Image (cartoon, rainbow, N blue to C red):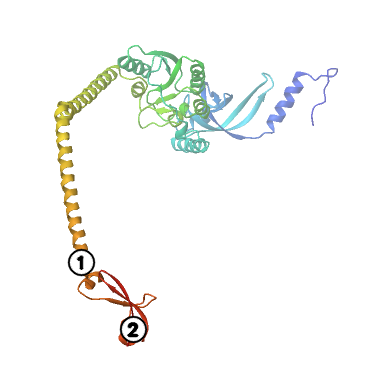
Amino acid sequence: MPLQTSAESPVPVRTVLRLVGEWIGRLGRVWVEGQIAELNRRGGTVYLILRDPVAAVSVRVICPRQVFDAADPAPVDGSRVVVWAKPDFSMARGAFSLSALQVRAVGAGELLARLDRLRRALAAEGLFAPERKRPLPFLPGTIGLICGRDSAAERDVLRNAAQRWPAVRFRVEPVAVQGPRAAEEVSAALAALDADRAVDVIIIARGGGSLEDLLPFSDESLVRAVAACRTPVVSAIGHEQDVPLLDLVADVRASTPTDAARRVVPDVGEQLALISDLRARARRQLAGRIDREAAWLAAIRSRPALASPRAEIDRRHEQVIALAERARRCLAARLDRAAADLEHARARLIALSPAATLRRGYAIVQRADSTVVTSALAVATGEDLHLRFADGRRSVTVSD
């Protein structure tokens, strides 16, 4: 039941704190997981600051020394632990804390299992999809570098990048690369570099370490921050065998900080050699093309039609005359054969003509209707007939 108060009838502080303490006391005992951000031993008591691995919140834990020492392996700063604790509220200080009854260190196997579950969940959201990867610029104007202060990773990246391209520029953001505040500081540095329009690519670099040392680079908030960046991000965490979740969400994964410098910065010597090689290839291609065209032009000019045009015209003129003569001979021969054929046909026609028969003394007997009489019995006495000779006609009348 809520406490009834008003401006005219307020309750004292002690009453509010007592009610808060009573409500917290009813929560009972709970298992709490977190990362040790601070560890202090004072006599028989160990005081811990337990930080949430994702959100930027923490809680104070009071643990008897014998309970803390019973954990195997012994937790240290940055360790992941699970605490069986009773929520407690101090009215004198108005502070909330947990009274630890049992402390368990989270083993590597359990950490790996949790990381695998987180990896599958983020992959299902598409944060590791290849199509989200952005290409790196060929020659970045300014490179953002997130690394530990005065770390070997920083020296490796700067030295190798300068060797490859002396004019390269860096904006270095030193951060904590392990411990409870590492993920938060890396995310803040990432946001600052991503907001800088002069920065064309960002490298997050750290040397090798244990699984617990590299846990900040598998932090869910950091992974999501990298996925939301507009600037391409290169992950260079640990060694080749180390694969924190940052490697999966980054646009490019480098096996080492040295490899990151090689991937981001082109080698000026290699580029000059490439330019020289391309120039030589272009020169050879152009010279070869000119040589081929010159040879083709020389071959065209050496042809008779271009080398001696008058001789070609004379040769063509002789060909025309020869063809005309050949055509004349062919036509004359065909006309002669046609005339002979015509004469032969004429002779046959004359030989087969009835007029030739009449000239040998024969005559053709015809009636008045011009029908030919072919039999003596077909002629009647007194019938008028016409006789046709080779040189004329005569009319007769049959008397007998």
Residue 174 visible in image: no
- The C terminus - image quarter: bottom left
Instruction: Locate residue 328: give its quadrant.
Output: top left
Q: What amino acid is labelled 2 in the image?
A: Val
Q: Position of residue 104 (x, y in %)?
A: 51, 34
Q: Is residue 333 above or below residue 356?
A: above
Q: Earlier in the sequence, mark 1 or mark 2?
A: 1
Residue 398: which numbered mark, if any? Answer: 2
Q: Say which of 299 and 386 sits in front.
A: 386
Q: Which residue is mark 1?
A: 348
Who's the residue at 45% across and 16% down the image?
Answer: 199
Residue 310 visible in image: yes
Q: Position of residue 241 (x, y in %)?
A: 36, 32
Q: Is residue 146 above or below residue 328?
A: above
Q: Say which of 24 and 290 sits in front.
A: 290
User: Which is more foreground, mark 1 or mark 2?
Assistant: 2
- The N terminus - image quarter: top right
Q: Position of residue 300 (x, y in %)?
A: 19, 28
Q: What amino acid is labelled 1 in the image?
A: Arg
Image-based side of 88 in relation to 302, left or right: right
Who's the residue at 18% across and 62% down the image?
Answer: 344
What whole-number distance in Å separates the C-alpha atoms at marks 1 and 2?
Answer: 37 Å
- Mark 2 residue crowding within 10 angstroms, few (<14) / some (14–19) / many (20+): few
Q: Is residue 178 above or below residue 368?
A: above
